[in-house]
C-alpha cells in the first residue's frame, strides 16, 4: 500500500480529477479519500471509479489520499471516515470522476482516428472503433486525453451496465495483509525514527508529584523525557528501551479528582441521574397526558456499562516536526482534524502539515480523535527528530475514550387495543461532545441521543424508527470525568438495547407477538417493516423451539440503513449460547456485497462480545481493567452461525459499517427471555 | 551479541538477551509482519514459528532461541495452503491479527496433517480478532485443509 506523496507531481498521464490517474503504462491509480480499517473501502471506492471509467480491474492500484480539500466527504464536510458515510458520500462524485475520464479517453481516440465519437466504445481499459477494428489502450491515449477539457456532468452508466459495482470483487489490500507486507501505524519506519511511550496518570485528573528523569535517561537507548498534557513521554531508540525507561521514570502520581470513582459509583451516578432534571431534546404531542390516560403503562430502567474500543492495533502516531513543515503518519480516521491539531501544536499553518495515513488495525470510531496525534507532535518537536508514540495494550484499554455507559428510564403507555400511544424516555450518560470540545447548548448532546432522536437533515439519520403520537426524550449529562467518544454506531447500540428490549416488554404487556407489535408502530416506515418481515421469514420466526431455547427479534435504523435481527439462543445453567443470528439489511443499492457481508458478520460478533463479555472496570478514580486477560473479548467458539439476507432495495443508499451493531444486544436479550422467561435489563448478560 | 536465524537467514543482534523476540524481529530486523497486540501472550498477533511450532514471540526471550529456526509470516511460502485459502475465502478485514492467525493455523496443520477443519477451529480460542472475522477464519481453515489434502493427493 503506497503512501501518497503529499505534493502531487504533475501527471504525465490523464488526471482529470484528484481521485485517480491513468498512467502512460495504463495503470489506473485510484486515490482513496477514506481510511481503510477493514471495512473494505479501498476496494469499494476503487470499484466505483473503475466501473464508470471502464478500467481493467487488473490494472487498478490504490493509494491513500493526502489531507486536502478535494478529499473532504460532502456528507461530513471533512476528510473523515466516520458515520458509515464513505460509500454513500463518495458514490456519485467518484462515478462522475470515472465517467469524465472515460469520456475524455474516447474523445482522444476519436480524434486520433478522425472518426465520430459515437463510433467508439470503451471497454476494460481499451477504446475500440468497431468499424475499422482499430483499438488503443488507455495508457496509449492518456497523454492525449489529458489535453481535453474535463466534462463536468458526464453521462453515468445504467445499473444494468455495471461490471464491478454490485459484484464481489476481491479486496485490493488482501494480498499484503496475508503476506505480512501491509503497513499499519505501529509499523511506520523512517530514518532515525525514535519511539516514545508515555507514563499516564492512573486516576482521572491525577498530576505527577515527582519522577526520576535521571534514572530514565540512564537506561540504554533512552534519549529524552518530555512531559506533556496526557503524561510524560520517554523517548528512546527502541520499543523495549522506551518501556524500560518509563519504568525507571518511577512517576509518583497525586490523587485524582475523584479518588472514590469505581464501577459501582458510576452506575449509581448514572442511575440517579434518571431522577434528576434533564434537558428536553424533543417532545411530540403530550406524553404526560397520554400516559395518564393510557389503559396500561409500563416503566423500566436499563443499564449499559462502558466498553473499550480495544482496536487490534493499539493507539499510535508518528510525527516529524521541522522548521517549516510537519509530517505526520499513522492510522487516523480524521485527516482534517489531525492536520489542524498537528499544525496548532507544531505552530504551523495546516497547509504546512502533511498527513500520511497508513492502514488501520481497526478504527471503531476511536481513531477520529486527535489526542494521539498531539502526543507525537509534542515529542517530535522536543526531540527534533521523527518520533513514533506507541501505546501499550494496557494504556490502550486504561486510557481509552470509551463508549459511554448509559442508564435509561422508559415509561410507555398502551391503549385498550394494545397500541403504543405514548413513550417518555430519559437518558443519563456522559457527554461525547464534551470530549470533542464541541459546545453543549441547552444541555443537549446530539451524539448521545442517536438511536432516539436526531437533527432532521443530519447524515447520521438516527431518529427512532417508530412513529409514536406522544414522544419525549430528556437527557441528563453526568459530569464525572470518564472520557468518551464514538464507538461503532456511537450511542445507537446502547440506546437500541433499551428501546428494543422495551418494545419486547411492551409487546408482552399488549399480549401481542413481538414482530406484529413492532410492525404496528412502523406504518410510516416501509423500509424498517421490510427488514423485519425479511428476517422473520428467513429465520423461522414463530416456529417452536425446545425448552431452554428461544428466539428474539430487534430492528434499528441508523446512518441511512435498516437492519433487523433474529437471535436463536440456548440458555443452560446460567450460560447463554447464541446458536444462530439472522440479519436482514437494507442499505439501498449494494456496491460491494463482499464487504457488506463481512461488515455485518463483524458487527454481529463485536456486538455479541459486548452483550456477553465486555465491561470496563473502574476503581480508585481510574480504570482497573488491564489487558486482554481481564478485559474479555469474544472468542471463536462463541460465534454463532450468522446469516445475512440483503434486501434488494432501490431506495436511498445507506452505510454499512455501523448499522449491523445496534440490533444484536436486544435481539439476544429478547431471545433469553423467550428461552427462560427472564427479562434482563443490563449487559453483559448475567443470569 | 545474539545470533538468531530468521526465515533462513542468520542475524547478529546487539540487544539484551531478555529482549522479547517480537521486538527484535520488528525493531532490529525490520520485519513488520509480526504484530504487537497485547504483550502478554493473550491475543496471538505476535505468533511466529520456532522450529516449526507456533509460539507467541512477545513471550519469548531472544536469548533463549539462539540456534532455533524462526519463521515469520514473511517466511511462510506464498503458496502455503493457508495463505492461498485466506485469499480465496477473502478472510481479512483490517488484517492486523491475520499474520498471527495464519501462523497459528499453519502450525496446527503441520502438527496434525490429518486433522479436519473442525478440530483446528476448536484450537483457535486463544486467538483474538476484533473485526469479528471469525466466521471467515473458519471458512479459511476449511479451505486450507481442503487445499492441503488436494496437494497430498497430487
Image (spheres, coloured by chain):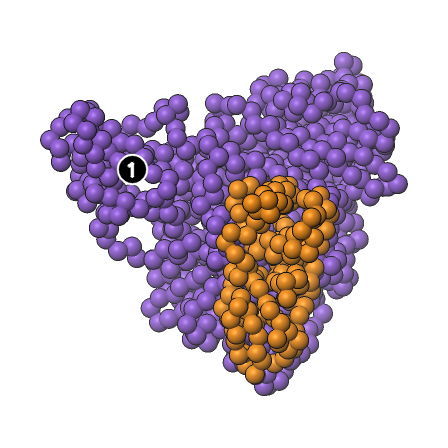
Chain colours: A purple, B orange
- Residues A59 and A584: in front is A59
**Residue drawn at 57 percent across, 49 percent down:** B81
Label 1: element kind: loop
Q: Nearer the viewer, residue A16 or B17?
A: B17
Give residue A518's position: percent from left, percent from top: 69, 22
Q: In this orientation, does residue A153 appear?
A: no
Quarter of the rendering occupied by the C terminus of chain A: top right
* Residue at 46% over, 72% down: A193
In the image, farthest residue toward the front = B154
Tell me if mark 1 has few (under 14), some (14-19) or many (20+) residues whose alpha carbon lies within 10 angstroms of its own: many
Q: In the current view of this chain or complex, which residue is farthest to the top?
A: A417
Query: In x, y percent, where is residue A330?
Result: 48, 59
Give the number of callouts. Answer: 1
Residue B55, picture quadrant: bottom right
Which residue is painted at 48% across and 23% down in the image? A650
Which quarter of the figure has residue A131? top left
Q: Is A101 positioned to the left or the right of A263 in the image?
A: left
Asked if residue A73 lies left or right of residue A608, the reply is left
Left or right: B108, with A329 as reference point:
right
Judge whether A686 appears above or below A7 on screen.
above
Q: What residue is drawn where x is 24% and y is 33%?
A: A127
Give percent across and percent down for residue A409: 75, 37
Residue denoted by label 1:
A125
Amino acid at each position: 500500500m503506497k503512501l501518497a506523496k503529499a505534493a502531487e507531481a504533475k501527471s504525465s498521464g490523464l488526471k482529470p480529477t484528484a481521485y485517480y490517474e491513468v498512467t502512460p503504462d495504463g495503470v489506473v491509480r485510484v486515490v482513496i479519500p477514506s481510511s481503510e480499517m477493514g471495512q473494505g473501502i479501498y476496494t469499494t471506492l476503487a470499484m466505483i471509479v473503475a466501473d464508470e471509467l471502464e478500467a481493467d480491474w487488473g490494472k487498478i492500484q490504490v493509494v491513500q489520499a493526502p489531507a486536502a480539500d478535494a478529499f473532504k466527504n460532502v456528507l461530513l464536510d471533512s476528510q473523515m471516515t466516520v458515520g458509515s458515510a464513505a460509500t454513500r458520500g463518495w458514490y456519485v462524485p467518484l462515478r462522475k470522476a470515472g465517467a469524465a475520464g472515460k469520456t475524455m479517453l474516447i474523445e482522444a481516440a476519436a480524434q486520433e482516428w478522425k472518426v465520430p465519437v459515437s463510433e467508439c466504445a470503451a471497454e476494460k481499459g481499451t477504446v475500440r472503433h468497431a468499424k475499422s477494428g482499430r483499438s488503443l489502450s488507455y495508457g496509449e491515449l492518456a497523454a492525449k486525453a489529458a489535453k481535453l477539457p474535463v466534462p463536468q456532468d458526464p453521462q453515468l452508466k445504467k445499473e444494468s451496465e455495471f461490471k464491478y459495482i454490485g459484484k464481489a470483487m476481491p479486496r485490493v489490500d488482501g494480498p499484503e495483509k496475508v503476506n505480512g507486507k501491509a503497513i499499519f501505524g505501529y509499523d511506520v519506519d523512517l530514518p532515525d525514527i525514535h519511539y516514545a511511550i508515555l507514563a499516564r496518570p492512573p486516576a482521572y485528573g491525577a498530576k505527577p508529584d515527582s519522577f526520576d528523569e535521571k534514572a530514565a535517561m540512564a537506561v540504554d537507548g533512552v534519549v529524552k523525557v518530555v512531559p506533556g498534557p496526557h503524561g510524560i513521554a520517554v523517548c528512546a531508540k527502541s520499543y523495549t528501551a522506551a518501556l524500560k525507561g518509563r519504568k525507571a521514570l518511577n512517576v509518583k502520581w497525586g490523587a485524582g479528582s475523584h479518588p472514590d470513582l469505581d464501577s459501582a459509583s458510576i452506575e449509581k451516578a448514572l442511575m440517579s441521574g434518571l431522577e434528576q432534571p434533564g434537558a428536553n431534546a424533543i417532545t411530540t404531542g403530550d406524553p404526560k397526558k397520554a400516559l395518564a390516560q393510557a389503559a396500561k403503562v409500563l416503566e423500566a430502567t436499563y443499564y449499559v456499562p462502558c466498553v473499550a474500543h480495544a482496536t487490534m492495533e493499539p493507539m499510535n502516531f508518528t510525527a516529524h516536526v521541522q522548521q517549516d513543515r510537519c509530517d505526520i503518519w499513522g492510522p487516523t480516521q480524521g485527516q482534517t482534524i489531525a492536520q489542524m491539531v498537528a499544525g496548532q501544536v507544531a505552530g504551523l499553518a495546516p497547509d504546512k502539515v502533511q498527513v500520511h495515513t497508513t492502514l488501520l488495525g481497526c478504527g471503531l470510531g476511536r481513531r477520529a480523535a486527535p489526542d494521539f496525534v498531539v502526543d507525537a507532535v509534542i515529542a517530535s518537536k522536543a526531540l527534533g527528530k521523527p518520533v513514533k508514540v506507541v501505546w501499550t495494550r494496557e494504556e490502550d484499554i486504561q486510557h481509552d475514550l470509551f463508549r459511554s455507559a448509559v442508564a435509561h428510564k422508559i415509561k410507555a403507555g398502551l391503549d385498550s387495543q394494545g397500541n403504543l400511544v405514548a413513550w417518555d424516555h430519559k437518558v443519563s450518560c456522559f457527554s461525547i461532545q464534551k470530549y470533542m470540545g464541541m459546545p453543549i447548548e441547552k444541555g443537549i448532546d446530539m451524539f448521545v441521543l442517536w438511536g432516539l432522536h436526531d437533527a432532521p437533515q443530519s447524515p447520521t439519520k438516527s431518529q427512532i424508527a417508530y412513529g409514536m403520537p406522544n414522544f419525549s426524550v430528556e437527557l441528563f449529562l453526568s459530569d464525572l470525568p470518564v472520557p468518551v467518544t464514538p464507538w461503532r454506531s456511537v450511542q445507537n447500540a446502547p440506546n437500541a438495547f433499551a428501546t428494543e428490549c422495551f418494545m419486547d416488554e411492551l409487546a408482552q404487556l399488549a399480549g401481542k407477538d413481538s414482530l406484529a407489535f413492532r410492525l404496528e408502530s412502523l406504518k410510516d416506515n416501509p423500509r424498517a417493516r421490510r427488514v423485519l418481515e425479511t428476517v422473520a421469514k428467513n429465520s423461522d420466526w414463530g416456529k417452536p423451539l425446545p425448552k431452554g431455547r428461544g428466539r428474539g427479534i430487534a430492528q434499528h435504523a441508523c446512518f441511512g440503513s435498516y437492519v433487523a435481527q433474529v437471535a436463536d439462543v440456548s440458555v443452560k445453567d446460567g450460560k447463554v449460547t447464541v446458536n444462530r443470528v439472522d440479519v436482514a439489511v437494507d442499505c439501498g443499492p449494494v456496491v460491494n456485497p463482499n464487504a457488506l457481508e463481512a461488515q455485518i458478520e463483524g458487527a454481529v460478533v463485536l456486538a455479541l462480545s459486548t452483550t456477553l463479555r465486555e465491561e470496563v472496570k473502574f476503581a480508585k478514580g481510574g480504570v482497573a481493567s488491564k489487558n486482554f486477560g481481564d478485559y474479555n473479548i469474544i472468542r471463536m467458539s462463541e460465534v454463532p452461525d450468522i446469516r445475512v439476507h440483503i434486501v434488494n432495495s432501490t431506495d436511498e443508499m445507506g452505510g454499512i459499517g455501523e448499522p449491523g451493531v445496534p440490533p444484536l444486544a436486544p435481539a439476544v436479550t429478547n431471545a433469553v427471555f423467550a428461552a427462560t422467561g427472564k427479562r434482563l435489563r443490563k449487559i453483559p448478560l448475567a443470569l | 551479541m545474539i545470533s538468531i536465524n530468521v526465515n533462513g537467514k542468520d542475524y547478529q543482534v546487539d540487544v539484551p538477551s531478555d529482549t522479547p523476540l517480537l521486538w527484535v524481529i520488528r525493531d532490529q530486523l525490520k520485519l513488520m509482519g509480526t504484530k504487537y497486540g497485547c504483550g502478554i501472550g493473550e491475543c496471538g498477533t505476535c505468533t511466529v514459528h520456532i522450529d516449526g511450532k507456533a509460539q507467541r514471540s512477545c513471550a519469548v526471550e531472544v536469548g533463549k532461541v539462539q540456534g532455533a529456526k524462526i519463521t515469520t509470516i514473511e517466511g511462510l511460502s506464498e503458496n502455503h495452503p493457508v495463505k492461498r485459502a485466506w485469499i480465496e475465502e477473502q478472510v481479512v478485514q483490517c488484517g492486523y491479527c491475520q499474520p498471527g492467525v495464519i501462523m497459528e493455523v499453519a502450525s496446527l496443520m503441520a502438527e496434525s496433517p490429518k486433522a479436519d477443519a473442525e478440530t483446528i477451529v476448536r484450537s483457535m480460542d486463544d486467538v483474538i480478532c476484533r473485526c469479528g472475522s471469525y466466521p471467515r477464519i473458519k471458512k479459511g481453515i476449511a479451505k486450507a485443509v481442503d487445499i492441503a489434502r488436494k496437494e497430498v493427493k497430487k
